[in-house]
Every structure is written in structure tokens, then in C-alpha cells.
Image (spheres, rainbow, N blue to C red):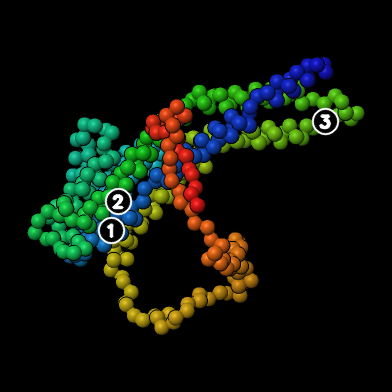
């Protein structure tokens, strides 16, 4: 029995369970965080749209609100294909039309597209068409109103942000299509469960006078290893229907609310330009409350101590550096075929 326990304990220790589990968990968490960062927000597009589309007439306002609606619509169409939660919220395109994000005429154009892979991109192409029409967009140096604005610096800036918006959605689809290889997940699970199968016998104690009825350390080890394995398996599918999956519906509500307020409230309600209380002050110190003053951190300072001392001109030594190639028979060829460089000092 002692030999059997020692054998199982030896083979259990030979399994690199920590290494394999650490690599698997770190890679799964990295993919999960990359997908979180790829969730686009319309803020940058709409801020630049307000900066360059300066007209406040009804046509310009309709154009800006339509662009904001198209940005949210593209997210809804894309997230319906990615997230189960969004698919339950918008189960059919009729629900999308009833929500006000799409008109009946736009739905007919959307439904007529033969390629289903680009249907979610249709609203973004409609945004491009609206921007490239003959509209009034203020440039940094001049204003165009009678011709196309395809070369305008403002349009170029908006198109760059729109391209980032579209690329983020496209890369999110790529992460969803190309999963972590299934064999990788199976190997990680097999390593963990094989380790604990061997540890079930290998961790038995026979040298102690009093045996422990509860193997506390083995139980903790099982909780940690299997827990990390389950964490990696769960974060591999961030757009599922579990409680810990990403709440894309909340993000859609946030983006829709921000889009309306960026177009209307922030553009129309501007504070007057006045001299504030800090205008004439040479030194500005922001106030502290009594509670925050108690927790005030020490002022950061440089911890490197630099000693300075005077040096007489006669104590300074000037040298001249020259590069001399060695003879042909002693030359060592490098990657680029040059000879070895020798450094000599002349005094």
C-alpha cells in the first residue's frame, strides 16, 4: 500500500498542471478583455460630427439625429448575431422596426440585401452616404456648401472614427467565429482531472501517527484548480446568457441615451464665456474636504540621489574614437556581412 501511494504521488507531481492551467487561464482572460475593449461607443463619432457640422437648421439636425440612430442600429443588428441576451430582446426584425431604430423603407432595403454577412453594416454605409452628400461641414480653414466635401478635413476625421467603429464590430465577429481551439480546452481539463485522480490516492498519509479525516490542503487545491478552470471556460464565451456574461443590453441603452444627449442637449445648452474665480490667480490650489485632507498622499518626489561636484578642467581627459577593421584572415562575418569592429582609443 505504501508503494502504491508513493507511486501515485510521484506521478501526480510530474504533471505540469500549474503551467498548463496558468497559460490557459491567462489566454482566455486576455481574449475576454480584448472583446470588452472592442465594444464600440458612438461618442467620438458624434463629438466630431457636432464639431464640423455646425448648421443648426432643421435639415442638419435631422441629418445628425439620423446618423446617431444608424450608429445604434448597426450595434443592435450586430449584437443580435453575437449575444443571446440581445437576441431575446430583439427576436425579430419587426421588433427592431417597432422600437423606432429602423423605418419601414429602411427595412425593405435591409431585407433586399442578398449577403447576410453585411446586413449589419448597411446602416454604416448609409452614414457614409449622408456625410458625402452636398452638406455644410465646417473645415478648419474654410467652409464648403456648394460642392462635395470628400476632401474636407472634417469629413476625413469623422470617417476615421466611423472606420474604427466598424472595425471594432468586425473584430468582435472575428473573435466569435474563431474560438479557443477545443483541443486546448480538453487538454487543460484532462490535466486537472487526471492530477486529482492521482492525488486522491497519492495524498494519503501513512507516516503520521494520527491521520487527518479531512484533507484540508487537498480540498483547497481542488477548489483553486477547478475554480480557475471553470473561470477560463466561462470567459471563453462572453456573449452568452449567463449572469456573469457581458450585459450588452445595458451598453445599448447607454449608447442610445448618450447619442440623443450629444446631438441635442450638449450642442444647444452651452455655458456663457465669462471670467471665472481662477482667472486672476497665479497659483491654483484645488480645495480639500477635511476627510480627504486626512488621506492626502505625500507629494511624489524623485528618489534618485544625484551628487554634483566641481571638476577641474585639468582633470578631464579627452579621447578620440576610431573604427578599424581587422585583417581579412581574422574578420568575423556577421549577419549583414560586415567585419568585426574594433574600438581603439588615442590619447
Q: Quadrant of the N terminus?
A: top right
Q: Position of residue 107 (x, y in %)?
A: 22, 42
Circle 1/circle 2 CB separation < 8 Å: yes
Question: Extreme right residue here?
Answer: 209
Distance, label 2 to label 3, CA atoms, is 63 Å
1 vs 3, front mark: 1
Which one is in front, 2 or 105? 2
Q: Which mark is residue 48?
A: 1
Question: Extreme front residue here?
Answer: 347
Where is mark 2, residue-wise?
161
Q: Is residue 243 left or right of residue 154?
A: right
Q: Is residue 189 left or right of residue 88?
A: right
Distance, label 1 to label 3, CA atoms, is 68 Å
Q: Which mark is residue 213?
A: 3
Q: Position of residue 210 (x, y in %)?
A: 89, 30
Nearest to N terminus: mark 1 or mark 2: 1
Distance, label 1 to label 2, CA atoms, is 9 Å
Q: Position of residue 120 (x, y in %)?
A: 28, 40
Classed neighbour count for the residue bearing mark 1: other residues with Cα under 10 Å, few (<14), some (14–19), many (≥20) = some
Nearest to N terminus: mark 2 or mark 3: 2
Classed neighbour count for the residue bearing mark 2: other residues with Cα under 10 Å, few (<14), some (14–19), many (≥20) = some
Question: Extreme bottom residue here?
Answer: 280
Q: Quadrant of residue 200?
A: top right
Q: Residue at x 85, y 24 (%)?
A: 206
Q: Helix, strand or loop at disc 1?
A: helix
Which one is in front, 103 or 174? 174
Residue 10 appears in the figure: yes
Above or below residue 60? Residue 219 is above
Amino acid at each position: 500500500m505504501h508503494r502504491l501511494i508513493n507511486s501515485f504521488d510521484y506521478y501526480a507531481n510530474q504533471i505540469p498542471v500549474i503551467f498548463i492551467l496558468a497559460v490557459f487561464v491567462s489566454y482566455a482572460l486576455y481574449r475576454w478583455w480584448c472583446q470588452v475593449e472592442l465594444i464600440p461607443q458612438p461618442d467620438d463619432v458624434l463629438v466630431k460630427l457636432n464639431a464640423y457640422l455646425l448648421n443648426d437648421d432643421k435639415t442638419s439636425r435631422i441629418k445628425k439625429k439620423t446618423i446617431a440612430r444608424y450608429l445604434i442600429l448597426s450595434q443592435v443588428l450586430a449584437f443580435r448575431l453575437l449575444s443571446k441576451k440581445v437576441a431575446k430582446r430583439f427576436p425579430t426584425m419587426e421588433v427592431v422596426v417597432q422600437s423606432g431604430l429602423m423605418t419601414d423603407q429602411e427595412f425593405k432595403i435591409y431585407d433586399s440585401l442578398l449577403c447576410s454577412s453585411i446586413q449589419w453594416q448597411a446602416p454604416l454605409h448609409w452614414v457614409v452616404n449622408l456625410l458625402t452628400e452636398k452638406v455644410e461641414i465646417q473645415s478648419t480653414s474654410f467652409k464648403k456648401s456648394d460642392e462635395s466635401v470628400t476632401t474636407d478635413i472634417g469629413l476625413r476625421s469623422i470617417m476615421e472614427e466611423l472606420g474604427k467603429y466598424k472595425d471594432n464590430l468586425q473584430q468582435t465577429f472575428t473573435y466569435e467565429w474563431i474560438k479557443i481551439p477545443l483541443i486546448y480546452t480538453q487538454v487543460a481539463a484532462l490535466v486537472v482531472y487526471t492530477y486529482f485522480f492521482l492525488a486522491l490516492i497519492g495524498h494519503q498519509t501513512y507516516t503520521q501517527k494520527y491521520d487527518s479525516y479531512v484533507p484540508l490542503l487537498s480540498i483547497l487545491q481542488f477548489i483553486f484548480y477547478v475554480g480557475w478552470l471553470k473561470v477560463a471556460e466561462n470567459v471563453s464565451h462572453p456573449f452568452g446568457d449567463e449572469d456573469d456574461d457581458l450585459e450588452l443590453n445595458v451598453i445599448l441603452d447607454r449608447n442610445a441615451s448618450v447619442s440623443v444627449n450629444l446631438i441635442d442637449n450638449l450642442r444647444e445648452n452651452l455655458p456663457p464665456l465669462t471670467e471665472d474665480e481662477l482667472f486672476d490667480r497665479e497659483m491654483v490650489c484645488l480645495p480639500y474636504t477635511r476627510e480627504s485632507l486626512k488621506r492626502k498622499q505625500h507629494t511624489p518626489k524623485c528618489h534618485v540621489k544625484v551628487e554634483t561636484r566641481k571638476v577641474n578642467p585639468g582633470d578631464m581627459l579627452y579621447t578620440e574614437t576610431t573604427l578599424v577593421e581587422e585583417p581579412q584572415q581574422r574578420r568575423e562575418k556577421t549577419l549583414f556581412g560586415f567585419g568585426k569592429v574594433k574600438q581603439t582609443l588615442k590619447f
